[in-house]
Image (tube, rainbow, N blue to C red):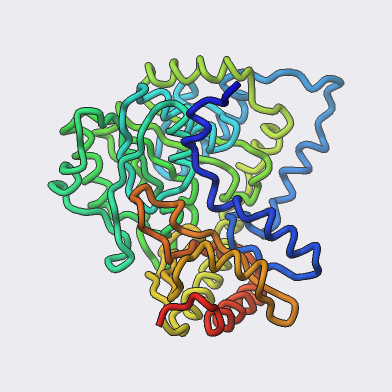
Amino acid sequence: MKPSTRLSKMQESPIRKLVPIAEKAKKSGKKIYHLNIGQPDIETPAAFLEAIKSFDQKTIAYSFSQGEPSLIRAMIGYYEKHGIHFAENELLVTNGGSEALLFSIIATTDPGDEILVPEPFYTNYNGFSLPVGVTVKPITTSPMDGFRLPDLATLESYLTPKTKTVLLSNPGNPTGVVYTSDEVKRIAELAIKHDLFIIADEVYREFVYDGFEYTSFASVPEIEDRLLLVDSISKRFSACGARIGLVASKNHDIISGILKLCMSRLCVPTLEQIGAEALYSVPQTYFDTVNTEYRARRDIVYEALNQIDGVVCEKPRGAFYVVAKLPVDDAEKFAIWLLEDYENNGESVMFAPAAGFYATPGLGVDEVRIAYILNQDSLKRAMAILDAALKVYPGRKK
């Protein structure tokens, strides 16, 4: 018997594929600084576990397929504070932002359709699209201009009769780009003019730096009938393992259709929903403190990269990632070499090779995504290791 062709077409996650090599290195006694995955070391607010510990039911029963009503109301309350209004029948709780993305893709496309995505992009956009027969068509952006979106005419040149949806993250993963109000309106104009859906992945909305103004796609009333907003508690509240996300839309046909998918997987875990609801009572001071910390970490990494000969990167304005072009022959080979063959006083560092964040073959081969999710001292040490390693890497470019 032969596995499905869908499996063979799927790529491995560039974020996780090198984990077995890293684990082997750690077992040999080497300390690894993990900058390959967006797993913050910020403590999850205590309210999450306190709410779960207070659970006093004798049975952990199924929840509603659409999510616990009290959690839905808490999520709606969060958006109200940002001037975004959803009714209770316009928001569904999902198993993380990942399920929200998968369900949104299924809801807006059929097999053979295409999704337009600015690249580099969150690698699982490909991972979610390919198994359902949908193709990601990339809009290539460049670090040389801050990964900004092209003008409307250029965007239109990427369209084909198969294009059904535009999918993008704002702030961006892996680039850290924060789209301007004009860029958001440009995508809105594209969608209206060509009758496209928009899937807006806004899980990093709280992480915007340097006084940049954040514009949610949900703030544009002209696209409310074609917008699917995807969100998650994972990054915002440093609760990645809780797997609580959401999809919201004012298009009731879309929400009714996604609810069928929610019914097919029964429900989101009951206890995690209880904990998540408590997170929405966390005060604004929590976000202010976390934002300040990530901005300081961003500065450490960006300033260090700019002092390393041959490295090129754009200063990220949001999220907690930076894409850096390294003076190496192949970033994946370099990442493996760091884990298997290099150490600096018994330590090394791990990044995510960036080629897997592109759909265009050949792009990102000498780039890495760095997640600045460790404490400041660890980041300083990791950047020092990178600098030292590049000086002796056998595949360094002249």
At 30% from the left edge and 26% from the top edge, which residue is drawn? 225
Residue nearest the observer in this picture, 245 or 33: 33
Q: Is residue 151 above or below residue 68?
A: below
In this rendering, the count of numbered labels is: 0
Q: Is residue 277 above or below residue 261?
A: below
Q: Position of residue 212 (x, y in %)?
A: 36, 62
Q: Is residue 37 above or below residue 254?
A: below
Q: Is residue 111 left or right of residue 377?
A: left
Please identify the residue farthest to the right as the structure is shown: 58
Q: Position of residue 167 (x, y in %)?
A: 36, 40
What quarter of the picture does the C terminus occupy? bottom left
Q: Position of residue 49 (x, y in %)?
A: 77, 43
Please identify the residue farthest to the front as the structure is shown: 1
Residue nearest the observer in this picture, 164 or 202: 164
Q: Is residue 167 left or right of residue 11?
A: left
Residue nearest the observer in this picture, 91 or 201: 201
At 44% from the left edge and 45% from the top edge, which residue is drawn? 202
Please identify the residue farthest to the left as the structure is shown: 153
Residue nearest the observer in this picture, 398 or 63: 398
At 47% from the left edge and 78% from the top edge, which residue is drawn? 396
Q: Is residue 246 above or below residue 202?
A: above
Q: Position of residue 266 (x, y in %)?
A: 63, 17
At 32% from the left edge and 48% from the top edge, which residue is drawn? 118
